[in-house]
Amino acid sequence: MDILNALVLFANFVIIPGITYGSQLALGALGVTLIFGILRFANFAHGDLMAFGTMFVILATWLLQDLGVSIFPFPTALIALPLGIISAILVSLLLDRSVYRFYRKKKSAPVVFLIASIGIMFLLNGIVRFVIGPDDRRFIDGAKFLVKVTEFKNATGLKEGLAIKLSQGITFFVALAVVISLFIFLQKTRTGKSMRAYSDNSELALLSGIDPEKVVFYAWLIAGTLAAVAGTLYGLDKSFKPFTYFQLLLPIFAAAILGGIGNPLGAIVGAYTVAFSEVTITYAYKKFLRYLVPESWEPNNLVQLLSTDYKFAVSFIILVVVLLVRPTGIFKGRVI
Amino acid sequence: MSFLSAQNMTGGYDSVDILRDCSISVERGQIAVIVGPNGAGKSTAMKAIFGLIMIKEGSIFLEGEDISMLSPQQRVKKGMAFVPQTENVFTTLTVEENLEMGAYLRKDNIKPTKDQVFELFPILHEKRNQIAGELSGGQRQQVAVGRALMTNPSVLMLDEPTAGVSPLVTVELFERILAIKKAGVAVLMVEQNARQALEIADMGYVLVTGENKFQGTGKSLLENAEVRRSFLGG
């Protein structure tokens, strides 16, 4: 029995990666849920919008690296982030003007918007692959670790080490700052309240003189920002590959729907739930159990419920179960 | 011409004319009530006056100005306020936020108006930080009326404000509406409690199949034998 070592091992391979991945999903799910709340459609292009914003961050990072600009120990990508945010916002607004507004004027059914968003998904996807290519791109520089395994072992004298990558620390704190500012904006400012009012009851919002085009403008502004930040954090932590960003749609939607689509708080709770489900189900518990059970009970296989190759199955099962059992999600969002 | 005057309105949804040559008007400091059987076009008339549906023929004048072509939002700017029959509050917003949203178009200090609304509906002050969706039916109606009053409107339009509330609350709401009228607002409302509504009305309109069947002061309609027999249950 060695509870302490077991806990450190668990923190290192489940809790810290879970929090990091959950924070990245939360930012993505917030964008999806916000667009759903205001424009009333499931935006399938959100994953590729993340890739689009991140692409600009990577290009600017490379340029800055060539110019010798650095903010060591922080990754250069952080100074390039504003450019990614601006480009994601601009492309969102441009696509809204040229595509979604047309269907808004026609008062098209939500499914028409959804199909249009799939078209936009392919468009953005094509642009990203054309510009930066379909391969893996790494753009992280600066210090690698916040806490190193050897340092941790030396400091605590434990057999197991704990490592926290700088990218994980940055992900958590940037996500925290973004989420807090978003909630202050939605709860305290006049524009934020008008967005909540419009999402709650668009007819009554019109009767109160709230301009729907202005609300839609702010919704894209926020969604673009969230997408670029989420994409960059994910890319820094793992790596950037256009196809991976497209695949992120599944856990992001699972998170938004589990929390109750249209509900920002729900998106965050849903994101961490999905992230921890994925990580806990695909983690191999053999070593962890070895610390906790007597030697004779020691498992002789990996004790892994599901291979990591199947991690998307977890989101998919969550999605299907939620839609069957409680389609409004935990926090009573809308039914898609 | 009256302060708000809808003249010879014809129209409805798509190709079906629900309103046929219907005219309704109201003065400042007066209450006009539209009564009539189900499907008479009472709510449609309200929506047409507010611009939520476009009429084919006829015109709507506010202070002598033709507002027939204005959008609902533009009519809000002109000083009109509308309380729909259902879904008339933001259920996920607090009571106070509901009032703030009512005043969305105003750039000046809304505190005095908010205080007036709280004075008119003291319960709203008590529950100002509560989510509107958690309130009782009667309290919700007060939030709905309060929200509409936040623009300082000159015309307040209420579509069945007492639908689904208890008789006691109905009496209370009518008292508040009288107070609003005394402040110089033109109140136009559709009511199912026809008798009670006509008692506080300065003008009454009985609508049948989209047409003006009877009209006159509230008192004269209450005394009219045919109106009593057909619409007020004797």
Image (cartoon, helix red, strand yellow):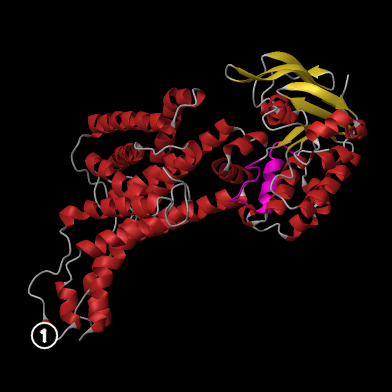
Residue situated in front as seen by the camera: A228 or A72: A228
For the residue labelled by badge 1, is the local secondary structure a helix, a strand or a loop? helix
Q: Picture coordinates of residue B132 (x, y %)? A: 64, 53
Q: Residue at x 14, y 69 (%)?
A: A303
Task: Tell me residue B174's x, y (percent).
Answer: 83, 46
**Front one among A296 and A291:** A296
Q: Is residue A52 visible?
A: yes
Task: Name above or below for residue A301 compared with residue B165.
Answer: below
B61 sits to left or right of A313 = right
Which region is colored magenta?
A: B86-108
The secondary structure that most of the magenta stretch takes on is loop
Q: Is residue A229 magenta?
A: no
Q: Which residue is mark 1?
A: A295
Of the 4 image quadrants, the one containing the C terminus of chain A is: top left
Q: Please report, as a chain letter, where disc 1 is located.
A: A
Category of crowding for the residue at label 1, using alpha-carbon neighbours closer than 10 angstroms: few (below 14), some (14–19), many (at least 20): few
